[in-house]
Amino acid sequence: MLALTACENQIADNHEIDGEDALQEITFSVLDFEQTLKQMGVIEADTRASLSGNATYLKVALFSGRSKKYEFAQTSDEEDFGVISALVLPDDYAMVVVASKVEMTIDDTTDFYPTGGKLNDTFHYYGSLTKANLEAGTVAVALHRTVALLEFKTDAKPTEVTSFTLEITGVSTKLNAETGLGVGSTTVATSFDQTGRSAVDCGMYVFLPSADASVTVKATAYDADKEIVKTYTFSGVQMKPAYHTCCSGNFFQIDADWSVTIDDVAWSAIAVPYDLSSL
C-alpha cells in the first residue's frame, strides 16, 4: 500500500468559472483500483489489479453532454500518482477514467485511443457523476481491463529468423467508453526484433469491436535480408475483451502441433487446433 495525499487542484482551462465559492472539491484516488471522492467516503471498486506497475498514465475526463468540461492527468513519476484533487462546478457529468501503460487521448465518451498509436495494457471506467453525488452522495466506480491480448509463442526458431510480424484483422484502434467495445474494425500490425532469441515470444494489445470477436492473424518470420522464412494466416481466432489469447506451438516445423487457447482470469482455456503440416 502507498501513502497518498491529494495533489494540487487542477481546473480545466476550457471551463468558465463564476467564482471559486461555487466550486466543489473532488478527489479521485486510484490505488489497487479503489476510488474515493473527498468528503463522500470510500467507494468500493474492482481490486483485481494494482495501479502500481500496471499503469503509467492516469486520466479523468468529465463531460457535459458532448462537451468535455474537465480533464485531469497524472504520470507514475509524480509523487502522488493515483490521487487527483480538483475543483469543479457542481453539475451532472459523464465521467471517463483511464489508467494505462501508454498515454491516452479522450476525445469523447465514445472515443478514446492511445496518443502515440501503440496500445498497451489499459483499464477504464465510464459512469455518471451527478450534482447530487458531488454535494452529498456517492458514486460506484470500478476500473476494468478493456483490452485483449494476443500472444504468439513458438518452440525453437531457425537462427536466420531475425524479425517477426503479427498482423491482426478485425480489431479496433479506438474504444467507446460507454460500451467498452472498439470503434470500427481494421487491421493492425507490429514487427518484433528476434535477433539473438532462441524462440519467438511476442504479443499485441488490441481493442475489440465485439464481446466475442473472430479475428484473422497473419504471422510472418523474416531473415536479416527481409526475406520471408515462413508465413501463415490463422483465420477465425477467437478473442474477447479482457481475455488473453495465446497462440503457441512449433511454428517452424512441418509436422507441428499448434493450438490457440483463450484464457480468462481464472486461467481456464479453450483449445482450437490448427494443422500446419501442409506448410
Image: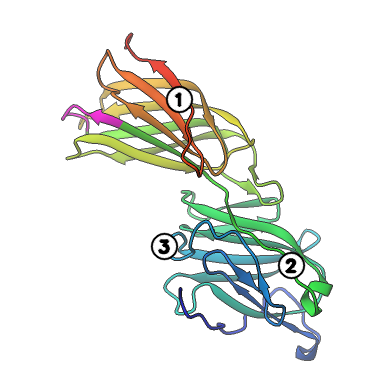
Q: Which residue is mark 2?
A: 139
Q: Where does the image place residue 95, in percent across and percent down from the top left?
A: 71, 63
**Looking at the image, how many numbered discs can be counted on the residues?**
3
| Sequence-first disc among 3 and 1 | 3
How packed mark 2 is, by other alpha carbons closer than 10 Å (few <14, some 14-19, many 20 or more), is: some
State the residue in front, 51 or 161.
Answer: 51
Residue 151 is drawn in which quadrant? top left
Q: Is residue 224 above or below residue 242?
A: above
State the residue in front, 225 or 134.
Answer: 134
The kind of residue on which mark 2 rests is Val
In contact (CB < 8 Å): disc 1 and disc 2: no
Q: Magenta span: helix, strand or loop, mainly?
A: loop
Residue furthest to the bottom in view is: 21
Which quadrant of the rendered structure holds the C terminus? top left
Q: Is residue 188 above or below residue 30?
A: above
Q: Where does the image place residue 77, in percent across and percent down from the top left?
A: 42, 73
Q: Which residue is mark 1?
A: 271
The kind of residue on which mark 1 rests is Ala
Q: Where does the image place residue 208, in percent across and percent down from the top left?
A: 58, 38
State the residue in front, 175 or 155.
Answer: 155
**Cα separation between marks 1 and 2:** 40 Å
Q: Where does the image place residue 67, in percent across and percent down from the top left?
A: 76, 63
How packed mark 1 is, by other alpha carbons closer than 10 Å (few <14, some 14-19, many 20 or more), is: few
Determine whether, in the image, residue 229 is placed left or right of residue 130.
Answer: left
Residue 185 is drawn in which quadrant? top right
**Cα separation between marks 3 and 1:** 30 Å
| Sequence-first disc among 3 and 2 | 3
Determine whether, in the image, residue 109 is placed left or right of residue 64.
Answer: left
Q: Which residue is mark 3?
A: 53
Range of residues picked out in magenta: 154-161
Q: Was residue 155 drawn as part of the magenta stretch in this picture?
A: yes
